[in-house]
Image: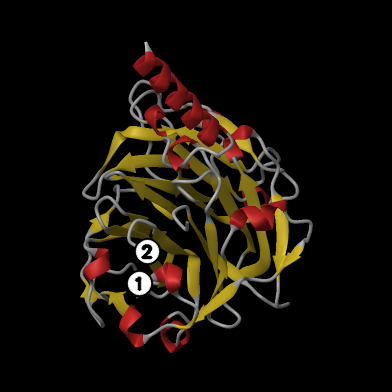
């Protein structure tokens, strides 16, 4: 009896001790996340060490807690790709991808402040062989489970995703040969997300999908590093898909897609959420949920999720124009409204953002 009492008392004390804490990332916690944004004006990474503090604060204009600089940033990333910032939160690597196909990797991310040591920064590039004519590189995504980096490439002649295996061990000045992930006929590929061995992509158009009933237009695809299959496609009017289709993935099976309402001619919530289990079922399926303000976030161009913590962030963009505004959603699938912040110094311009759910 005494032992059972003591066990019960211990369990009660443990519950009391943990009951006031937010759950970890696997269950949607929000504590311990940091945000990184690349300022194109100064070729500098801005670091916000505690996203919760930024979100809960009353200030609409916020300065970063620290900045990360390197001469390699300015020489290799003269123009960051839209969505060209991603990280490996497991191993603390940050990846920067330029719209011309240069890649910079920074290690020991969480301890960086000021100028990065030459020992902690490496630059390499995508080979010129196999590139699409007149192309531009776009969103990048890192699958930490396979150490694979995915980068979209788009041109008027087609679209493809570059698959960079062993991303964390690519050497200085390496030229990465083309391993293309694509579906014949697809075009307008501007969004990619990856995790647990799966890769998700947004395509603006492509060949028709289906047999008895066929569909065309914007689509989301699910595949692996080697191939997509038409069976794993979401397409059709019920999906509400539209350009530019920036993607983000959390660790609970939610795929977020940001639609640029202005360019897509849409007037409903700009962020569409699809559970990954929908792929392989019917093609023409509605989003599991939607979020965002159709007007205030009508020009969303980039989004990123903290993966192990429940934060979603977004950046504005119109054509080639970027801005210094960041939208932040805390527990986004819970229906919370975004907080908009303007980052100082004045004149900062962002085309890439990443959130580290393992910051503390």
Q: What's the distance in space between the residues labelled 1 and 2, CA to CA?
A: 6 Å
- How crowded pointer 1 is (Cα within 10 Å; few <14, some 14-19, many 20+) is rated as many
Give the image location of residue 53, x and y in percent. Answer: 66, 56
Image quadrant in which the N terminus is located:
top left
Mark carried by residue 92: 2
Give the image location of residue 217, x and y in percent. Answer: 48, 40
- Name the foreground residue: 103 vs 328: 328
> What residue is pinned by disc 1?
107
Give the image location of residue 156, x and y in percent. Answer: 43, 62
Q: Secondary structure at mark 1?
A: loop
Residue 217 can be seen in this image: no
Rendered position, 189 above or below 97? above
Rendered position, 239 above or below 35? above
Q: Quadrant of residue 144?
A: bottom left
Q: Quadrant of residue 155?
A: bottom left
Count of numbered marks:
2
Left or right: where 287 falls relative to 223: right
Mark carried by residue 65: none
């Amino acid at each position: 009896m005494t032992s059972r009492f003591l066990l019960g008392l211990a369990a009660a004390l443990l519950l009391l001790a943990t009951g006031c804490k937010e759950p970890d990332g696997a269950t949607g916690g929000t504590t311990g996340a940091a945000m990184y944004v690349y300022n194109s004006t100064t070729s500098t990474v801005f670091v916000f060490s505690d996203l919760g503090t930024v979100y809960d604060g009353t200030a609409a204009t916020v300065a970063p807690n620290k900045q990360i600089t390197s001469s390699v940033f300015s020489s290799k990333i003269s123009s960051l790709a839209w969505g060209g910032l991603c990280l490996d939160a497991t191993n603390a690597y940050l990846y920067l991808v330029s719209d011309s196909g240069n890649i910079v990797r920074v290690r020991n991310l969480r301890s960086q402040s000021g100028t990065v040591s030459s020992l902690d920064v490496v630059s390499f590039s995508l080979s010129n062989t196999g590139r699409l004519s007149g192309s531009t590189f776009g969103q990048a995504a890192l699958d930490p489970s396979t150490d694979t980096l995915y980068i979209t490439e788009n041109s008027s002649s087609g679209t493809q995703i570059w698959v960079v295996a062993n991303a964390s061990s690519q050497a200085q000045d390496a030229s990465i040969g083309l391993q293309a992930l694509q579906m014949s006929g697809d075009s307008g590929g501007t969004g990619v997300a990856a995790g647990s061995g799966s890769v998700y992509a947004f395509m603006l158009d492509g060949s028709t999908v289906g047999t008895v009933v066929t569909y065309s237009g914007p689509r989301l695809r699910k595949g692996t590093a080697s191939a997509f299959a038409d069976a794993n496609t979401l397409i059709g009017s019920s999906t509400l898909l539209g350009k530019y289709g920036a993607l983000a993935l959390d660790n609970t099976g939610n795929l977020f897609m940001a639609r640029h309402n202005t360019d897509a001619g849409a007037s409903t919530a700009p962020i569409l959420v699809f559970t990954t289990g929908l792929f392989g079922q019917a093609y023409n399926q509605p989003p599991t949920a939607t979020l965002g303000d159709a007007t205030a976030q009508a020009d969303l161009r980039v989004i990123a999720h903290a993966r192990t913590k429940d934060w979603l962030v977004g950046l504005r963009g119109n054509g080639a124009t970027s801005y210094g505004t960041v939208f932040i959603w805390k527990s986004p699938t819970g229906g919370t409204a975004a907080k908009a912040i303007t980052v100082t110094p004045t004149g900062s311009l962002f085309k890439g953002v990443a959130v580290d759910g393992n910051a503390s």
